[in-house]
Image: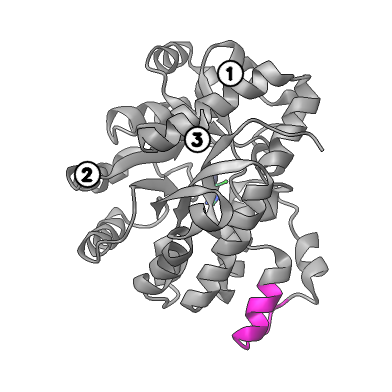
Amino acid sequence: MQSFPPCAELHLHIEGTLEPDLVFELAARNRITLPYADAADLAARYAFTDLQSFLDLYYATMDVLRTEADFADMTRAYLRRAAAAGVRHAEIMMDPQAHLIRGIPLATCVNGVSSVLATSEAEFGVSTLLIAAFLRDRPAAEALDVLRDLLDMKAPIVGIGLDSAEVGYPPSLFAEVYDVARSAGLRCVAHAGEEGPPSYIREALDVLRAERIDHGIRCLEDEALVERLVADRVPLTVCPLSNVRLGAVDDLPAHPLPVMLARGLNVSVNSDDPAYFGGYLDDNLMAVGETFGWGAAELAIVAGNSLRSAFLDDARRSLLL
Ligand code: ES4
Ligand code: ZN
Protein backbone atom coordinates (compact mmCIF):
# COMPACT_ATOMS: atom_id res chain seq x y z
CA MET A 1 0.00 0.00 0.00
CA GLN A 2 1.47 3.28 -1.15
CA SER A 3 1.42 6.11 1.37
CA PHE A 4 0.75 9.71 0.42
CA PRO A 5 1.86 12.96 2.04
CA PRO A 6 -0.66 14.70 4.34
CA CYS A 7 -3.43 16.11 2.15
CA ALA A 8 -6.46 18.32 2.30
CA GLU A 9 -9.55 17.30 0.38
CA LEU A 10 -11.13 20.53 -0.90
CA HIS A 11 -13.75 19.25 -3.35
CA LEU A 12 -16.08 16.73 -1.80
CA HIS A 13 -19.88 16.55 -1.83
CA ILE A 14 -21.00 14.78 1.33
CA GLU A 15 -24.09 13.43 -0.45
CA GLY A 16 -21.70 11.91 -3.01
CA THR A 17 -20.19 9.71 -0.30
CA LEU A 18 -23.39 7.72 0.15
CA GLU A 19 -22.27 4.16 -0.62
CA PRO A 20 -24.81 1.63 -1.99
CA ASP A 21 -24.70 -0.46 1.21
CA LEU A 22 -25.54 2.60 3.32
CA VAL A 23 -28.31 3.58 0.88
CA PHE A 24 -29.94 0.21 1.57
CA GLU A 25 -29.34 0.43 5.32
CA LEU A 26 -30.95 3.89 5.52
CA ALA A 27 -33.83 2.84 3.25
CA ALA A 28 -34.60 -0.09 5.58
CA ARG A 29 -34.38 2.14 8.66
CA ASN A 30 -36.76 4.68 7.11
CA ARG A 31 -39.07 2.04 5.59
CA ILE A 32 -38.43 3.21 2.03
CA THR A 33 -38.75 0.76 -0.86
CA LEU A 34 -35.97 1.34 -3.40
CA PRO A 35 -36.39 0.63 -7.12
CA TYR A 36 -33.22 -1.52 -7.06
CA ALA A 37 -32.90 -5.22 -6.18
CA ASP A 38 -29.91 -4.71 -3.87
CA ALA A 39 -26.72 -2.69 -3.38
CA ALA A 40 -24.97 -4.46 -6.27
CA ASP A 41 -27.90 -3.67 -8.58
CA LEU A 42 -27.70 0.01 -7.55
CA ALA A 43 -23.91 0.09 -8.03
CA ALA A 44 -24.34 -1.41 -11.50
CA ARG A 45 -26.27 1.72 -12.49
CA TYR A 46 -23.27 3.96 -11.82
CA ALA A 47 -22.51 4.15 -15.54
CA PHE A 48 -22.83 7.79 -16.51
CA THR A 49 -22.67 9.57 -19.85
CA ASP A 50 -22.41 13.14 -18.58
CA LEU A 51 -22.95 15.32 -15.52
CA GLN A 52 -26.76 15.31 -15.81
CA SER A 53 -27.02 11.51 -15.98
CA PHE A 54 -25.07 11.36 -12.70
CA LEU A 55 -27.07 14.16 -11.06
CA ASP A 56 -30.36 12.36 -11.79
CA LEU A 57 -29.23 9.31 -9.79
CA TYR A 58 -27.45 11.41 -7.13
CA TYR A 59 -30.61 13.41 -6.33
CA ALA A 60 -32.81 10.28 -6.42
CA THR A 61 -30.57 8.26 -4.09
CA MET A 62 -30.28 10.93 -1.42
CA ASP A 63 -34.00 10.49 -0.74
CA VAL A 64 -32.98 7.89 1.87
CA LEU A 65 -31.55 10.75 3.99
CA ARG A 66 -34.41 11.68 6.28
CA THR A 67 -33.18 12.23 9.86
CA GLU A 68 -30.23 13.90 11.57
CA ALA A 69 -28.90 10.42 12.35
CA ASP A 70 -28.93 9.56 8.61
CA PHE A 71 -26.85 12.64 7.77
CA ALA A 72 -24.57 11.90 10.71
CA ASP A 73 -24.00 8.26 9.70
CA MET A 74 -23.15 9.27 6.13
CA THR A 75 -20.69 11.90 7.38
CA ARG A 76 -19.04 9.50 9.85
CA ALA A 77 -18.58 6.87 7.12
CA TYR A 78 -16.88 9.42 4.86
CA LEU A 79 -14.52 10.67 7.59
CA ARG A 80 -13.49 7.14 8.53
CA ARG A 81 -12.69 6.33 4.89
CA ALA A 82 -11.03 9.71 4.26
CA ALA A 83 -8.75 9.22 7.27
CA ALA A 84 -7.68 5.85 5.85
CA ALA A 85 -6.98 7.61 2.53
CA GLY A 86 -4.55 10.01 4.21
CA VAL A 87 -6.88 13.03 4.30
CA ARG A 88 -5.91 15.23 7.25
CA HIS A 89 -8.25 18.12 6.52
CA ALA A 90 -11.52 18.13 4.56
CA GLU A 91 -13.65 21.02 3.31
CA ILE A 92 -16.99 19.38 2.82
CA MET A 93 -19.79 20.67 0.59
CA MET A 94 -23.42 19.92 1.26
CA ASP A 95 -26.46 20.72 -0.91
CA PRO A 96 -29.16 22.08 1.46
CA GLN A 97 -31.64 22.80 -1.37
CA ALA A 98 -31.56 19.17 -2.51
CA HIS A 99 -32.99 18.28 0.90
CA LEU A 100 -35.28 21.28 1.40
CA ILE A 101 -37.14 20.65 -1.86
CA ARG A 102 -38.03 17.13 -0.71
CA GLY A 103 -39.29 18.39 2.64
CA ILE A 104 -36.26 17.88 4.88
CA PRO A 105 -35.77 20.89 7.21
CA LEU A 106 -32.54 22.86 6.95
CA ALA A 107 -31.71 22.11 10.59
CA THR A 108 -31.89 18.34 9.96
CA CYS A 109 -29.18 18.28 7.32
CA VAL A 110 -27.01 21.03 8.83
CA ASN A 111 -27.11 19.60 12.36
CA GLY A 112 -26.74 15.99 11.22
CA VAL A 113 -23.56 16.72 9.25
CA SER A 114 -22.07 19.32 11.60
CA SER A 115 -22.60 17.23 14.75
CA VAL A 116 -20.11 14.71 13.36
CA LEU A 117 -17.72 17.34 11.96
CA ALA A 118 -17.49 18.82 15.47
CA THR A 119 -15.59 15.77 16.78
CA SER A 120 -13.86 14.73 13.57
CA GLU A 121 -10.38 15.97 14.44
CA ALA A 122 -10.44 14.16 17.79
CA GLU A 123 -12.10 11.01 16.45
CA PHE A 124 -10.50 10.62 13.00
CA GLY A 125 -7.53 13.02 12.96
CA VAL A 126 -9.28 14.93 10.16
CA SER A 127 -9.98 18.62 10.71
CA THR A 128 -13.03 19.81 8.78
CA LEU A 129 -14.86 22.85 7.49
CA LEU A 130 -18.37 22.92 6.01
CA ILE A 131 -19.39 24.69 2.79
CA ALA A 132 -23.03 25.18 1.79
CA ALA A 133 -23.35 24.75 -1.98
CA PHE A 134 -26.21 26.21 -3.98
CA LEU A 135 -27.81 24.48 -6.94
CA ARG A 136 -27.20 26.60 -10.04
CA ASP A 137 -30.08 24.98 -11.96
CA ARG A 138 -32.55 26.37 -9.41
CA PRO A 139 -33.51 30.06 -9.01
CA ALA A 140 -30.98 32.42 -7.45
CA ALA A 141 -33.81 33.83 -5.31
CA GLU A 142 -34.18 30.41 -3.68
CA ALA A 143 -30.43 30.27 -3.00
CA LEU A 144 -30.64 33.71 -1.40
CA ASP A 145 -33.49 32.60 0.87
CA VAL A 146 -31.53 29.52 1.96
CA LEU A 147 -28.39 31.60 2.54
CA ARG A 148 -30.35 34.01 4.75
CA ASP A 149 -31.80 31.06 6.71
CA LEU A 150 -28.29 29.61 7.17
CA LEU A 151 -27.07 32.98 8.46
CA ASP A 152 -30.10 33.38 10.75
CA MET A 153 -29.56 29.95 12.30
CA LYS A 154 -25.80 30.66 12.61
CA ALA A 155 -25.01 27.47 10.70
CA PRO A 156 -21.36 26.47 11.23
CA ILE A 157 -20.29 27.06 7.62
CA VAL A 158 -17.00 28.57 6.43
CA GLY A 159 -18.27 29.46 2.99
CA ILE A 160 -20.54 28.88 0.04
CA GLY A 161 -20.20 27.00 -3.24
CA LEU A 162 -22.13 26.57 -6.49
CA ASP A 163 -22.79 23.18 -8.07
CA SER A 164 -25.20 20.98 -10.06
CA ALA A 165 -25.90 21.27 -13.83
CA GLU A 166 -23.44 23.83 -15.19
CA VAL A 167 -24.11 24.54 -18.87
CA GLY A 168 -26.81 27.20 -19.30
CA TYR A 169 -26.44 28.40 -15.70
CA PRO A 170 -23.55 30.91 -15.70
CA PRO A 171 -22.06 32.08 -12.40
CA SER A 172 -23.26 35.67 -12.91
CA LEU A 173 -26.84 34.54 -12.09
CA PHE A 174 -25.64 34.23 -8.47
CA ALA A 175 -23.87 37.59 -8.07
CA GLU A 176 -26.16 38.79 -5.30
CA VAL A 177 -25.92 35.50 -3.36
CA TYR A 178 -22.12 35.79 -3.34
CA ASP A 179 -22.23 39.49 -2.38
CA VAL A 180 -24.43 38.71 0.63
CA ALA A 181 -22.24 35.75 1.64
CA ARG A 182 -19.04 37.77 1.39
CA SER A 183 -20.57 40.61 3.43
CA ALA A 184 -21.39 38.03 6.10
CA GLY A 185 -17.73 36.98 6.22
CA LEU A 186 -18.11 33.73 4.29
CA ARG A 187 -15.48 32.35 1.91
CA CYS A 188 -16.49 31.84 -1.73
CA VAL A 189 -15.84 28.91 -4.08
CA ALA A 190 -17.69 27.83 -7.24
CA HIS A 191 -17.75 24.95 -9.70
CA ALA A 192 -16.74 26.26 -13.12
CA GLY A 193 -15.16 24.81 -16.24
CA GLU A 194 -16.18 21.20 -15.60
CA GLU A 195 -18.59 20.97 -18.55
CA GLY A 196 -18.99 24.73 -18.95
CA PRO A 197 -16.74 27.03 -21.00
CA PRO A 198 -13.72 29.04 -19.81
CA SER A 199 -15.93 32.15 -19.72
CA TYR A 200 -17.71 30.61 -16.71
CA ILE A 201 -14.37 30.44 -14.89
CA ARG A 202 -13.80 34.14 -15.67
CA GLU A 203 -17.30 34.99 -14.40
CA ALA A 204 -16.75 33.01 -11.21
CA LEU A 205 -13.59 35.06 -10.59
CA ASP A 206 -14.82 38.47 -11.77
CA VAL A 207 -18.48 38.46 -10.75
CA LEU A 208 -18.64 36.00 -7.82
CA ARG A 209 -15.06 36.78 -6.71
CA ALA A 210 -14.60 33.07 -6.07
CA GLU A 211 -11.38 32.33 -4.18
CA ARG A 212 -11.20 28.76 -5.48
CA ILE A 213 -12.51 27.11 -8.63
CA ASP A 214 -13.92 23.60 -8.38
CA HIS A 215 -12.78 21.59 -11.45
CA GLY A 216 -11.60 24.39 -13.78
CA ILE A 217 -10.16 21.88 -16.26
CA ARG A 218 -11.49 23.75 -19.32
CA CYS A 219 -9.28 26.77 -18.47
CA LEU A 220 -6.68 25.27 -20.83
CA GLU A 221 -8.84 26.37 -23.78
CA ASP A 222 -8.13 30.03 -22.92
CA GLU A 223 -4.44 30.94 -22.80
CA ALA A 224 -4.94 34.37 -21.24
CA LEU A 225 -7.08 32.80 -18.52
CA VAL A 226 -4.38 30.22 -17.77
CA GLU A 227 -1.81 33.02 -17.40
CA ARG A 228 -4.12 34.85 -15.00
CA LEU A 229 -4.82 31.72 -12.92
CA VAL A 230 -1.08 31.01 -12.70
CA ALA A 231 -0.19 34.61 -11.80
CA ASP A 232 -2.88 34.80 -9.12
CA ARG A 233 -2.21 31.25 -7.83
CA VAL A 234 -5.97 30.55 -8.03
CA PRO A 235 -6.61 27.07 -6.59
CA LEU A 236 -8.26 24.59 -8.98
CA THR A 237 -9.71 21.55 -7.21
CA VAL A 238 -9.36 18.87 -9.88
CA CYS A 239 -11.23 15.55 -9.65
CA PRO A 240 -9.62 13.08 -12.09
CA LEU A 241 -11.81 9.97 -11.62
CA SER A 242 -14.94 12.14 -11.63
CA ASN A 243 -13.96 13.72 -14.94
CA VAL A 244 -13.42 10.28 -16.48
CA ARG A 245 -16.71 8.84 -15.17
CA LEU A 246 -18.74 11.85 -16.36
CA GLY A 247 -17.07 11.96 -19.76
CA ALA A 248 -15.48 15.39 -19.29
CA VAL A 249 -12.31 13.65 -20.54
CA ASP A 250 -12.07 10.53 -22.72
CA ASP A 251 -9.96 8.53 -20.28
CA LEU A 252 -7.38 9.09 -17.55
CA PRO A 253 -4.34 9.20 -19.89
CA ALA A 254 -6.12 12.05 -21.72
CA HIS A 255 -6.74 14.01 -18.49
CA PRO A 256 -5.21 17.52 -18.55
CA LEU A 257 -3.89 17.31 -14.96
CA PRO A 258 -0.19 16.84 -15.93
CA VAL A 259 -0.43 19.74 -18.40
CA MET A 260 -2.06 21.89 -15.73
CA LEU A 261 0.70 21.01 -13.29
CA ALA A 262 3.41 21.69 -15.88
CA ARG A 263 1.84 25.06 -16.67
CA GLY A 264 2.25 26.03 -13.02
CA LEU A 265 -1.45 26.04 -12.15
CA ASN A 266 -2.32 25.62 -8.47
CA VAL A 267 -3.97 22.21 -8.81
CA SER A 268 -5.01 19.76 -6.11
CA VAL A 269 -6.46 16.25 -6.45
CA ASN A 270 -9.89 15.53 -5.01
CA SER A 271 -12.57 12.85 -5.09
CA ASP A 272 -15.79 14.89 -5.73
CA ASP A 273 -18.43 12.13 -5.24
CA PRO A 274 -16.31 9.12 -4.28
CA ALA A 275 -19.17 6.63 -3.82
CA TYR A 276 -20.22 7.21 -7.43
CA PHE A 277 -16.96 7.76 -9.29
CA GLY A 278 -14.82 4.79 -8.32
CA GLY A 279 -12.75 6.07 -5.50
CA TYR A 280 -11.68 8.18 -2.56
CA LEU A 281 -8.69 10.51 -2.44
CA ASP A 282 -6.13 7.69 -2.24
CA ASP A 283 -7.72 5.97 -5.25
CA ASN A 284 -7.51 9.22 -7.22
CA LEU A 285 -3.87 9.80 -6.22
CA MET A 286 -2.96 6.19 -6.97
CA ALA A 287 -4.62 6.35 -10.40
CA VAL A 288 -2.97 9.61 -11.47
CA GLY A 289 0.37 8.52 -9.98
CA GLU A 290 0.35 5.31 -12.01
CA THR A 291 -1.06 6.81 -15.19
CA PHE A 292 1.27 9.81 -15.29
CA GLY A 293 4.31 8.15 -13.71
CA TRP A 294 4.28 10.53 -10.78
CA GLY A 295 6.80 10.12 -8.00
CA ALA A 296 7.12 11.66 -4.57
CA ALA A 297 7.94 15.11 -6.02
CA GLU A 298 4.68 15.53 -7.96
CA LEU A 299 2.61 14.08 -5.12
CA ALA A 300 4.26 16.52 -2.70
CA ILE A 301 3.34 19.45 -4.99
CA VAL A 302 -0.37 18.60 -5.23
CA ALA A 303 -0.54 17.75 -1.51
CA GLY A 304 1.15 21.05 -0.64
CA ASN A 305 -1.19 22.93 -2.98
CA SER A 306 -4.20 21.36 -1.25
CA LEU A 307 -3.04 22.44 2.21
CA ARG A 308 -2.03 25.96 1.11
CA SER A 309 -5.38 26.41 -0.69
CA ALA A 310 -7.48 25.33 2.31
CA PHE A 311 -9.40 27.79 4.48
CA LEU A 312 -7.53 26.36 7.46
CA ASP A 313 -6.24 28.31 10.40
CA ASP A 314 -2.49 28.82 10.17
CA ALA A 315 -1.65 26.71 13.23
CA ARG A 316 -3.27 23.59 11.79
CA ARG A 317 -1.88 24.35 8.32
CA SER A 318 1.71 24.55 9.56
CA LEU A 319 1.22 21.36 11.54
CA LEU A 320 0.23 19.52 8.34
CA LEU A 321 2.64 21.14 5.86
C1 ES4 B 1 -21.26 17.38 -8.67
CL1 ES4 B 1 -19.30 16.32 -10.20
C2 ES4 B 1 -20.44 17.54 -9.78
N1 ES4 B 1 -20.57 18.61 -10.57
C3 ES4 B 1 -21.48 19.51 -10.28
N2 ES4 B 1 -22.31 19.42 -9.21
C4 ES4 B 1 -22.18 18.35 -8.43
N3 ES4 B 1 -22.87 18.00 -7.32
C5 ES4 B 1 -22.38 16.84 -6.89
N4 ES4 B 1 -21.40 16.45 -7.71
ZN1 ZN C 1 -18.13 18.76 -7.50
Name the residue that disc number 1 marks. Answer: 260
Question: As shown in the figure, which amino acid type bears the numbered disc 2?
Answer: Gly
The earlier-in-sequence mark between 2 and 1 is 2
**Residue 306 within the segment the image draws in magenta:** no
**Residue range (magenta):** 23-35
Magenta segment: does it hold 34?
A: yes
Q: Secondary structure at mark 2?
A: loop
Residue on which the image places disc 3: 196
Single out the mark in the foreground, 3 or 2: 2
Around disc 3, counting alpha carbons within 10 Å, would you say few (fewer than 14), some (14 to 19), or many (20 or more)?
A: many
Using the image as rendered, state which of residue 290 and residue 63 is in the foreground. 290
Query: Local crowd at mark 2 within 10 Å, few (<14), some, or many (≥20)?
Result: few
* Quadrant of the image containing the N terminus: top right
Q: Where does the image place residue 45, in percent across and percent down from the top left? A: 76, 61
Q: x%, y% of residue 60?
A: 59, 68
Q: Which residue is found at the position 58% from the left and 54% from the top?
A: 124
Q: Secondary structure at mark 3?
A: loop
- Left or right of 250 on screen, residue 53: left
